[in-house]
Image (spheres, rainbow, N blue to C red):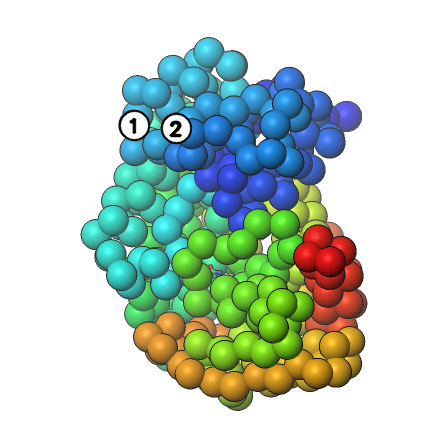
Amino acid sequence: MNKFKKILVTGGLGQIGTELSLELINIYGSENVVITDIRDSLPEKLQDKALYTKLNVLNYEELNNLIKYHNIDAIYHLAAILSGKGEENPFACWDINMNGSMNVFKTSIENNVKRIFIPSSMAAWGLGIPKQDVPQDSITRPTSIYGVTKVAGERLCEYMFHKYNLDCRGIRYPGIISSETLPGGGTTDYAVEIFYEAIKNNHYTSFIDKGTVLPMMYMPDCIKATINLMDADVNKLTHHGDYNVAAFSFAPEDLAREIANVLPAFTIDYKPDFRQAIADSWPQTIDDSCAREDWNWTPEYDITSMTKDMIAKLSERFK
Ligand code: AKB
């Protein structure tokens, strides 16, 4: 049975938002999923398939009115500025990520929203962490403004749960690789761009250096994790806004090798930029045993199956 009656997605036209919205529409029906974003209208592939309202999450009144109007009982709050863009404008990153989330908390409390999802990220980690198998309960000393907002968001989810009985949930996403919508300004974006360049030009210049191993996940697993955590029994959860999840880890040269197995002419070179310092502060592998125990998390894709699927999908689109 479906858990919720009417769902709101903020940032619903972003990298994760687009595919999450499509899956929620499959499960709940297009009349029960309200997509919001700052764009004027829906892209072609979503037109006539979804309810859409242009919304800036910083506008509390509009957000609150929308939630009342639709009688929303679950929110997936994905509107955020990611790590790369965050370093270009730290004040805007704080504003959108923190004040946007505060608006979502406040309206959820006011309107008795049953459950909300606010993603965290591996960016919550930073100085002094174990690079291998970073545990669920580990120190979080991020060096990026995005990471600072993610740690604050995690703590706020916990706080709102205890103070207001607001059921807030979140995952520490690794880098997410996807074929439908490009990511918008993260450090792990290279692992998506590389596929587009491989198909179009047989070559990619990576802004992340050789040897930089980072945790990654394919979009179908990201959507599965997000929906499964939201559907989980609250009594089984030992955490709220900060579940570790993992799928596979690789360095750019590992991914290049996998791509070359399918597209033998592919080559890569390296020109690291400011995002290298962010990547260097993140772990290489993540211990996700807590998510596995609490809500049965298991990923389906590994680097090889993800690479084959990405190339098949993008080759079809760009043929
Ligand atoms: C980013 O690179 O900023 C994001 C993230 C890991 O949260 N993909």
Q: Quadrant of residue 196?
A: bottom right
Q: Is residue 126 above or below residue 52?
A: below
Residue 151 appears in the rendering: no
Q: Which mark is residue 23?
A: none
Q: Which residue is mark 2?
A: 55
Residue plotted at (64% across, 18% down):
31
Q: In the figure, is residue 187 to the left or right of 132? A: left
Q: Is residue 212 above or below residue 200?
A: below
Residue plotted at (58% across, 69% down):
197
Whether pointer 1 and pointer 2 mark residues with C-beta atoms closer than 8 Å, the reply is yes
Q: Quadrant of residue 146?
A: bottom left
The single residue placed furthest to the left in the displayed view is 91
Q: Quadrant of residue 192?
A: bottom right
User: Which secondary structure, mark 2?
Assistant: loop
Label 1: how many Cα within 10 Å (few below 14, some 14–19, many 20+): few
Residue plotted at (51% across, 39% down):
13
Q: Which mark is residue 59?
A: 1
Q: In the figure, is residue 246 to the left or right of 162? A: right
User: Which secondary structure, mark 1?
Assistant: loop
Q: Which residue is more in the foreground, 35 or 200?
A: 200
Badge 2 amino acid: Leu
Instruction: Single out the mark in the foreground, 1 or 2.
Output: 2
